[in-house]
Amino acid sequence: MSLKRFGVSLEDHLLDALDGYADGNGFANRSQAIRFLVEKNVAEQKWQCGHLVAGAVIIMYDRSKKEIAAKITVVQQDYTDVILSSSQYYINQNSCLHIVTVMGAAFRLTELSDRLTTIKGIRHGKLVMGRAD
C-alpha cells in the first residue's frame, strides 16, 4: 500500500495534544499517530451497523462505591437480549474488574458499552468485539 502525503493545519493546543499522544503511546512520529487515530475512527464507525458480533465490555471501578455496582445492574437489565454473562473480579480492596460477555448487533453492543463506560465513577471502560457471522 502506497503512502500519500498531505498537509494538515492545527491550532497550537491540538498540535501539542497530538505530540503528547504520539509520545505517550510510543509512536515514532506524528504520521503514525494520525494513521492510528484515523484507522481507529473508521473501525469504530463500521461497528455502528447491524452486523452480528461477539465480544466483551470491560470496566474497572472503585468497589467501595456500591452505587456504581447498582447502576451497572440497572443498565445490564436493559440489555439481557445481548448479554451472555457478567462477572466481577476483585483485584484488590479498592478495585473491581467487571467483564460483560456479549453477542448481538454491533450497534446494540456499542450502545450498551457507551452506557456502562459513562457511569460516573467508572475508572476505565472498553468494548472489544469481532464479527460472529
Image (cartoon, rainbow, N blue to C red):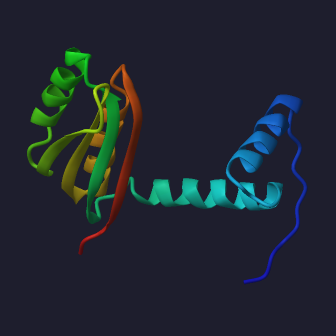
Query: In the rendered view, would you say 42 is above or below 61?
Result: below
* Rendering coords of residue 55 (x, y %): 27, 59
Query: In the rendered view, would you say 127 is above or below 43?
Result: above
The quadrant in which residue 59 appears is: top left
Q: How many marks?
A: 0
40 or 23: which is nearer to us? 23
Please state if 116 lies on the left or on the right of 13 as rendered: left
* Rendering coords of residue 88 (x, y %): 18, 40
Give the residue displayed 28% in from the left and 27% down from the top: 93
37 or 48: which is nearer to us? 37
Give the residue displayed 20% in from the left and 29% down from the top: 72
Residue at the limit of the structure toward the front, as seen here = 93
* Rendering coords of residue 69 (x, y %): 19, 25
| Figure quadrant of the C terminus | bottom left
Residue at the limit of the structure toward the bottom, as seen here = 1
Please state if 128 lies on the left or on the right of 89 as rendered: right
The quadrant in which residue 84 appears is: bottom left
Give the residue displayed 39% in from the left and 53% down from the top: 48
The quadrant in which residue 27 appears is: bottom right
| Figure quadrant of the N terminus | bottom right
* Rendering coords of residue 116 (x, y %): 29, 33
Give the residue displayed 82% in from the left and 54% down from the top: 30
Query: In the rendered view, would you say 46 is above or below 73?
Result: below
Please state if 102 lies on the left or on the right of 62 as rendered: left
Please state if 79 lies on the left or on the right of 48 as rendered: left
